[in-house]
Image (cartoon, coloured by chain):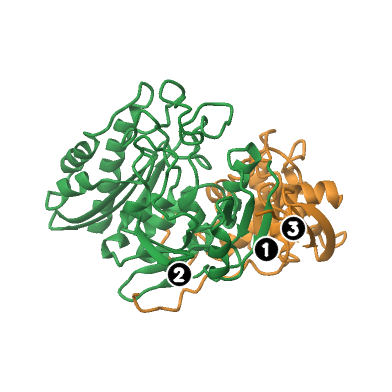
Chain colours: A green, B orange
Amino acid sequence: MREFGYQRVFDVPGAVTLGADPEARYLGGGTNLVDLMKSGVERPGLLIDVRELPLDRIVPTEGGGLRIGATATNSDLAAHPEVRRRYPALAQAVLAGASGQLRNMATVGGNLLQRTRCAYFTEPAQPCNKRTPGSGCAAVNGEHRNHAILGASEHCVAVHPSDMGVALTAFDAVVTYETADGPGELPLAEFYLPVGDTPHLETALPSGALITGITLPPAPVAANSRYRKVRERASYAFAIGSIAAALDTRDGVVREVRLAFGAVASRPWRARAAERALTGAPATAESFAAAADAELAAAKALPHNGYKVTLLRNLVVAVLTELTEEAAR
Amino acid sequence: MSHSTASVITLNINGEKHTLPVDHRTTLLDALRERLDLTGTKKGCDQGQCGACTVLLDGRRAVSCLQLAVAAEGREVTTIEGIADGDQLHPVQQAFLDLDGYQCGYCTPGQVCSAIAMIEEHAAGWPSAVTADVRPQAEAAPLTAEEIRERMSGNLCRCGAYVSIVRAIAEAARPGVPRPPSPSGELGHLAGSEETEGVA
C-alpha cells in the first residue's frame, strides 16, 4: 500500500478545501476504498476522513420525501422508520447488501461511489480499461457471467455493484454535493456517465466534489414497493440480477409504476421503456412480461451472461405480480 | 503537497487508553494484534469478507481489517478481551461454551462480538433481509433461526459449526437471559425520525 496522509475534517468547507488536491480521496466507512488500497487499485496520497462531518441525519421532508445525509450509515438508513414506511424497497435493498458489520461502517455517499467488483478491475496484474485506460478489457473474452447486458461497450462490461443505488434510481433520487466553488446537484439518472470508450470516468461529479446528501422527492407509489435480489448464495453476496419496483393500480389498470434493475449495467438501470409500456396497461402477468421484453429488447448478452435476460424478465413478472396482490389486500 | 504519513494516536480499547505511533496504513486489526498484544481478535481474509476480525466500535459491530487505526481514534473499541465481566462470561460466550458453538475456535471471537451486537440490533427493531415486512411494526419480528442465519451471514466458519452457532445465539437471545451492557454502552442513536423539515 502506498503511504498516505490522513486528515480528519469537521466541516464541509474544510473538507472541500483539502479535496481540491487531486491525490486526495474522501474516506467514509472505508469498506471499499481501504480494500482497494490494500490491493493497489487505489493509491491516494491523502485521505480526508469525512465521518465526523455533520451530514449523518436522515430527515423526512414535507409532502413525504426524505433528505439523507451522505455520512449516514447503511444501517441507519435501513433502520429508519420513515425509510421503511415511505420507501420500503430502499430499506430492503440496503439490507440485501453486504453484512451487518459492513452496513454499520459503510456510508450512503460512499455506496454511490463504490467501484465494480469485476475480478479484472480488482486485480492490478490484469488489463482493465476502467483501472488503466487503454490496457484493454479482459472480461469481454474472459470470465463474464456476472457482467453487463445493458449499456456496456466493447471497452468495459463491468456492472455497478450497489443494491441501494437501484432503489434510489427507481425513486428519482437527487445527489447533492459541495465543491470549493460552491454547491451543486445531480439527479441520479445523470450521476453515472455512459461507458463508451471512457469507462474510467464513472460519475459526472466535478473534480474534488464531496457528496453531502441524497434527496428523495415524495413518491406515494413507493409505499407499495419491493426489492428482490438474486445471487449465487442465500446471503452476503453481490447480485447477479436485482429489481426495485413500485406499483399503483386501480381497477386492474396500472396507474403508476417504477422499475430499476441492478447488476445488469455500469450503473443502476432505470427501466423507462418498461415503465412506459406498463402505464395504463392491465396489471396482468402478460403485460408485465411484455413490458420486460420492451426494456430488454436493447440487451446485448455476452457468451456467458445470456441467462440474465431471462432472469430479469422473470423478476419483473414475479415482483410486479406480488405488488399487484399486495395492493389488492 | 507532502503529508505526514504517520501519527501518534490514542485508542480507547475495552475502557483503557493506549497511546502509540502508527503508520497511517495500519489497520485497527493489526494495531490490536501486532502492537497492543490483543490477539483475541483474529485475522482471517483481511478483506472484510469473513468476519473473524469483528469488534465493536461505539457499540456497533465492525470488521477491524477495513478500519484504519488512525480513523478509530476517539471511538470506543471493544474486543473479545473486553466482553466478559471479570471471570463472569458474557451470556453469548457462555452459550457458545454450553452448546459447542465452534469447532477449531478461530472464528469464535468474531462470532461472539458479532452476535452480541446483532442481538442488540434486533432488540432495537432493526429489520433484516429475511424480515417479511420491513415497514415499522408495533412489535418486532422474533429472532428466529432464519433471522439469526441472515443477520450472522458476515461471519464465516470454515469448520461449518453453523448449526451449533445458531443454537447458541438463539439461547443467548432467549427472553429472560440478561443482556449485560457492553463496555461501550448503547447501540448508538437512530438518526432523527421525528423531525420534519420543509422541502428545500
Q: Which mark is residue B138?
A: 2
Give how far apart the Cα atoms at labels 3 and 1 are.
17 Å
In the image, residue B69 sits, relative to residue A300, either above or below, namely below
Query: Residue A196 versus residue A262: which sits nearer the camera?
Result: A196
Where residue B124 appears, x then y in whole percent? 56, 66
A214 with respect to A318 (left or right): right
Q: Which mark is residue B59?
A: 1
Give the residue type that dot 1 points to: Gly
Mark 1 vs mark 2, foreground winner is 1
Query: Residue A292 versus residue A284: which sits nearer the camera?
Result: A292
Assign a secondary structure to mark 3.
Answer: helix
The answer to whether one can see residue B171 in this image is: no
A193 with respect to B74 (left or right): left
- The residue at the point 71 percent across, 59 percent down is B72
**Residue matched to label 3:** B91
The mark nearer the N terminus, 1 or 2, is: 1
The mark nearer the N terminus, 3 or 1, is: 1
Give the residue type that dot 3 points to: Pro
Give how far apart the Cα atoms at labels 1 and 2 are.
25 Å
* Residues at circles 3 and 2 in contact by the CB criterion of under 8 Å: no
Label 1 neighbour load within 10 Å: few <14, some 14-19, many 20+: many
Mark 3 vs mark 1, foreground winner is 1
* Residues at circles 1 and 2 in contact by the CB criterion of under 8 Å: no
Where residue A286 appears, x then y in whole percent? 16, 40
Where residue B4 appears, x then y in whole percent? 74, 55
Query: Residue A41 versus residue A94: which sits nearer the camera?
Result: A41
Chain for mark 3?
B
Give the residue type that dot 2 points to: Ala
